[in-house]
Image (spheres, rainbow, N blue to C red):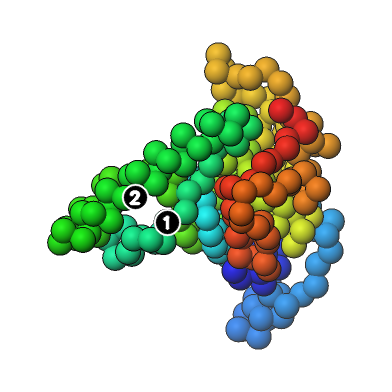
Amino acid sequence: MNCQAVAEAEKNMVFAARLTQRGHKINTMEDLTALYEKSFSNDTVTAISKLPHPTIQKFAVITVAIVGASRRFLAQITRHQNEVKFMSASLQYSNYAGQADFAVPYEILTAPKAIQEMYLESCKSDMDCYEELCAAGIGHDAAGYVTPQGLRNVLIISATPYQWKHIIGQRVCRRNTDETRIVLLKIWQELFSLSQVLFAPDLTGPFCQRDQCLEGKMSCKRKLLTSSMLFLSETSLRTRFCKSYKVLSFIITYTPNINFSFSDR
C-alpha cells in the first residue's frame, strides 16, 4: 500500500547508522536534518543491511494489503507478533451471505475434477448453514463459527523491514502450506522490485538459501536455489476456474483459485 515506505526504510536505516557515529558533530536541528538528507549509495545500503544490528532496520513500517487469501492463511501468518500488526475483515461485522468465495488448496486444484467439486460443495454447504442461521436471527459473529477455513479474506499487514525479512525467510520454506508460500513469495517479489538491495536473496530468503536449514529432523533436505526462488513469475501462474490474479502497486490481490506451478516442487 505504501510503496514509498521502502525507500524511506533505506533512508532511515542509513540515517540511524550514521547518527551513532556522528553525535559529536550534531549541535543543532539543522545539523541533524542535513545528516538525514545526506545522499547514499546502494553499496552503503548493502553494507549496513548485512550488519548484525537489526535495530537500524526498524525505523520504518511497510504495509501490505492481501485480498483473497484464506482464513487458514490468517491463522498461520498472525503467529508473527514482533514488530508486526494485522487488521482483518471481521466475521462479526461482515455479512458473507451470498458473497462467499473460497481458496482452493494446490493439492485439490491438481486432483481430479470430482475431488475439486467435493471440496467446493463442502464449502458451499457450510455457507448454506451460515445463511440459514443468519436468516433465523443468529448474529453474524455466532453464525461465523460454521464458515470453512477456505473462506477468502481481506488482510492488512504492517511490519518493519527487518520483520518482513524474518517473516519471508520463515514462510517461503517448504515446511509451509503452498498458499502461504505463494503469498509471501509475491510479497517478496514486490519488495524486491522496490529495493533489490534491502531485500536481496542473501538477506531475505529461506534459511537454507542464506545459510543452512534450521528445521532439524523436519527438514525437507532439498535446498532452495536462488534461481528457483527469484521469483514467482507471471508465467508460472496458469489461471484456473473463474478468478484473475494481479498485483496492483503494493496491494496484493491473491486469488487462490489458480493452478500454481513451482519450479522447485
Quick one: quadrant of the N terminus?
A: bottom right
Judge from the rendering whether residue 71 lies leftward or rightward of residue 54; answer left or right: left
Q: Amino acid at mark 2?
A: Met
Is residue 113 something one can see in this rendering?
yes
Residue 42 vs residue 213, the one in the foreground? 213
Relative vertical location of residue 1 with respect to residue 240 in this rendering, above or below: below
The image quadrant where one finds the C terminus is: top right
User: Between residues 199 and 54, which one lies in front from this camera angle?
Assistant: 199
Q: Which residue is mark 1?
A: 100
Q: Position of residue 127 (x, y in %)?
A: 34, 50
Dot 1: what SS?
loop
Q: Is residue 125 toward the left or the right of residue 35 in the image? A: left
Residue 163 spot, x, y in % from top left: 55, 50
Quickly name the residue at label 2: 127
**Dots 1 and 2: beta carbons under 8 Å?**
yes
Looking at numbered disc 1 in the image, what kind of residue is underneath it?
Ala
